[in-house]
């Protein structure tokens, strides 16, 4: 299985968040480190944009020998489709660049489910969401995306799988549910307060090695109590 990270520098809530640092590692580096722990992911590609601000991401990828693809800034659907076709991915895992703490064991579980339940357009854990924000995983069939671009509105172009979920009766969608509903928890880096909080958590608890999303939730709750 192959993985595509969608990343940009022009976030409105937290500009440049992809390369912001937590415990001396960039958000992108933490994400890559977690993804590389999976033995089921063969190739990782960072899909960024032609926007001048994203040259920093391209430079980072070149220096660190990370596969990358450059596409439209706002039509993320087209960017990821073109990326998947360029690298000849029949299916690909879509991970958002603001999810550095993604649990690779959760990814491996969804890949395992795909191997047993075949021919779905999307395998996901967000329809409906029962995992924390920042633990969103989608395995998308590339051919299912083809021919849809002209049907999409502005929001559907920006949010890659939105069209599928809004027209779920037309597609085969498999959702992996958590035993407990953790959808209220946020483990993503969406805004300045998220970055500040996780910097403090990492420093206080000296987080350097692998941590499950359950452990991170517990540490966050512990930190917020004090």
Image: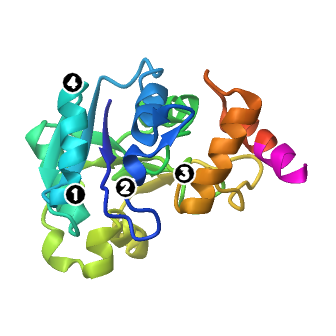
For the residues labelled 2 and 4, the Cα–Cα distance comes to 20 Å
Q: Which residues are magenta?
A: 220-226
For the residues labelled 2 and 1, the Cα–Cα distance comes to 8 Å
Q: Earlier in the sequence, mark 3 or mark 4?
A: 4
For the residues labelled 3 and 1, the Cα–Cα distance comes to 31 Å
For the residues labelled 3 and 4, the Cα–Cα distance comes to 30 Å
Determine which residue is flagged by label 2. Answer: 16
Q: Earlier in the sequence, mark 3 or mark 1?
A: 1
Identify the secondary structure beneath mark 1: helix
Q: Earlier in the sequence, mark 4 or mark 1?
A: 1
Q: Earlier in the sequence, mark 2 or mark 1?
A: 2
Horizontally, is 226 left or right of 24 in the view? right
Task: Give the quadrant of the N terminus.
Answer: top left
Instruction: Identify which residue, 2 or 172, lies in the foreground.
Output: 2
User: Residue 122 in the image: x percent, y percent?
Assistant: 38, 52
User: Residue pushed farthest right?
Assistant: 226
Identify the secondary structure beneath mark 4: loop
Badge 4, how many Cα within 10 Å: few under 14, some, many 20+? Answer: few
Determine which residue is flagged by label 4. Answer: 65
Residue found at x 30% / y 70%: 158
Determine which residue is flagged by label 3. Answer: 125
Please name which of the two marks, 3 or 1, marks the residue nearer to the observer.
1
For the residues labelled 2 and 3, the Cα–Cα distance comes to 27 Å
Determine which residue is flagged by label 1. Answer: 53
Please name which of the two marks, 2 or 4, marks the residue nearer to the observer.
2
């Amino acid at each position: 299985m192959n993985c595509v990270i969608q990343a940009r520098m022009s976030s409105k809530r937290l500009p440049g968040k992809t390369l912001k640092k937590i415990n001396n590692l960039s958000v992108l580096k933490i994400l890559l480190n977690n993804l590389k722990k999976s033995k089921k992911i063969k190739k990782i590609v960072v899909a960024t944009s032609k926007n001048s601000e994203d040259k920093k991401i391209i430079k980072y990828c070149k220096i660190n020998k990370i596969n990358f693809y450059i596409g439209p800034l706002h039509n993320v659907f087209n960017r990821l489709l073109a990326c998947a076709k360029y690298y000849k991915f029949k299916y690909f895992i879509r991970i958002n660049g603001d999810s550095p703490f993604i649990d690779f064991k959760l990814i491996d579980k969804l890949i395992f489910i795909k191997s047993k339940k075949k021919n779905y357009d999307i395998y996901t854990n967000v329809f409906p969401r029962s995992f924390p924000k920042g633990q969103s995983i989608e395995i998308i069939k590339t051919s299912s995306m083809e021919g849809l671009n002209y049907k999409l509105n502005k929001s559907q172009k920006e949010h890659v799988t939105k069209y599928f979920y809004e027209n779920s009766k037309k597609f085969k969608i498999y959702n992996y549910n958590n035993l407990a509903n953790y959808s209220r928890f946020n483990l993503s880096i969406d805004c300045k307060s998220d970055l500040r909080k996780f910097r403090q958590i990492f420093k206080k608890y000296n987080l350097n090695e692998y941590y499950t999303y359950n452990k991170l939730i517990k540490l966050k709750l512990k930190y917020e109590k004090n």
